[in-house]
Image (tube, helix red, strand yellow):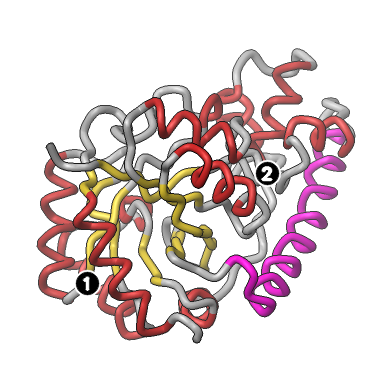
């Protein structure tokens, strides 16, 4: 039987609901051979996850997920096999988190103006000490009775184009990829359907541009993908000479329909995918 892995997931270090150690423990229960912890703009959860992995016999690939600029849709770039102690990466993450802090203050002010008073302390309490994001605001809004569900919080107030939405600071794609490479990692285009490309030709153009900036791989299996989308992305990866990656984008209770390792039942990422990515990372690893 093929060993299965999951190379995209989140913990309480960003917008997941399980601690890094709990993520690893669940991975063991699910029978996964390896996982990548890829929290948003932070490596804070990696030491706990790596220690838990050693204790429980689950390989933990150090990772990160970075949001990059794109005119249409959303571009997230996952870094795998990064050095979690890279000083330059940490400095850049701290700068991004400072920008997130300013954005969070604006969201608090706007919700208060809209008659839904919340405090940063309340939101921080939902983050478990990790990076604060919109899911934590949504959780407070549900708790205080302003909305019935987290989905309603986003649909009516927090999503792009809604009254309490503010864009977060984003890096250029080239800068995001270089940031990952400088930390010894492999740069992966995450959940490519979120690029909102109109068809295969447009997707290939977008991926080719990222390839020009040094993109190493693309997720060909992800949580919302249809069989047709995965096949399309496989074709694009082959023509562009990119490695494959994949993962569930597991968030725990913040995405309750997504199961670690299988997403909605349609993904199956095998260990050979991990080994190809590992080989690609080695030439850039520091000595």
Depth-wise, is mark 1 or mark 2 nearer the camera?
1
Name the residue: 16% across, 61% down. 200
What residue span does the magenta drawing correspond to? Answer: 84-113
**Residue picked out by circle 1:** 242
Q: Position of residue 216 (x, y in %)?
A: 31, 74
Q: Is residue 65 magenta?
A: no
Is 9 or 161 nearer to us in this picture? Answer: 9
Mark 1 closeness class: few <14, some 14–19, many ≥20 residues within 10 Å: some
Name the residue: 42% across, 41% down. 57
Judge left or right: residue 78 versus residue 272: right
Is 36 or 72 nearer to us in this picture? Answer: 36
Mark 2: which secondary structure? loop
Up-down relation of residue 79 to residue 179 (above or below): above
**Residue picked out by circle 2:** 133
Q: Which mark is residue 253?
A: none
Q: Is residue 206 visible?
A: no
């Amino acid at each position: 039987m093929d060993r299965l892995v999951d190379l995209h997931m989140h913990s309480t270090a960003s917008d997941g609901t399980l601690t890094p150690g709990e993520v690893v423990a669940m991975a063991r229960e699910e029978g996964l051979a390896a996982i990548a912890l890829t929290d948003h703009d932070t490596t804070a959860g990696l030491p706990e996850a790596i220690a838990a992995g050693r204790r429980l016999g689950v390989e933990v690939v150090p990772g990160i997920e970075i949001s990059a600029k794109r005119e249409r849709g959303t571009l997230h770039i996952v870094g795998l096999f990064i050095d979690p102690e890279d000083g330059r990466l940490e400095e850049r993450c701290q700068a991004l988190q400072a920008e997130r802090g300013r954005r969070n203050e604006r969201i608090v002010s706007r919700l208060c103006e809209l008659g839904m008073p919340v405090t940063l302390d309340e939101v921080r309490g939902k983050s478990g000490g990790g990076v604060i994001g919109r899911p934590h605001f949504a959780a407070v809004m549900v708790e205080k009775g302003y909305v019935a569900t987290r989905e309603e919080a986003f649909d009516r107030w927090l999503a792009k184009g809604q009254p309490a939405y503010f864009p977060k600071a984003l890096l250029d794609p080239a800068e995001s990829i270089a940031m990952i490479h400088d930390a010894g990692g492999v740069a992966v285009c995450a959940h490519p359907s979120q690029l909102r490309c109109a068809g295969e030709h447009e997707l290939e153009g977008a991926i080719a541009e990222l390839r020009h900036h040094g993109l190493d791989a693309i997720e060909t299996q992800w949580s919302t993908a249809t069989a047709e989308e995965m096949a399309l992305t496989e074709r694009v990866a082959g023509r562009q000479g990119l490695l494959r990656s994949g993962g569930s984008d597991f968030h725990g209770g913040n995405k309750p329909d997504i199961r670690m390792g299988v997403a909605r039942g349609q993904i199956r990422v095998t260990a050979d995918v991990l080994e190809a990515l590992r080989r690609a990372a080695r030439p850039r690893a520091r000595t």
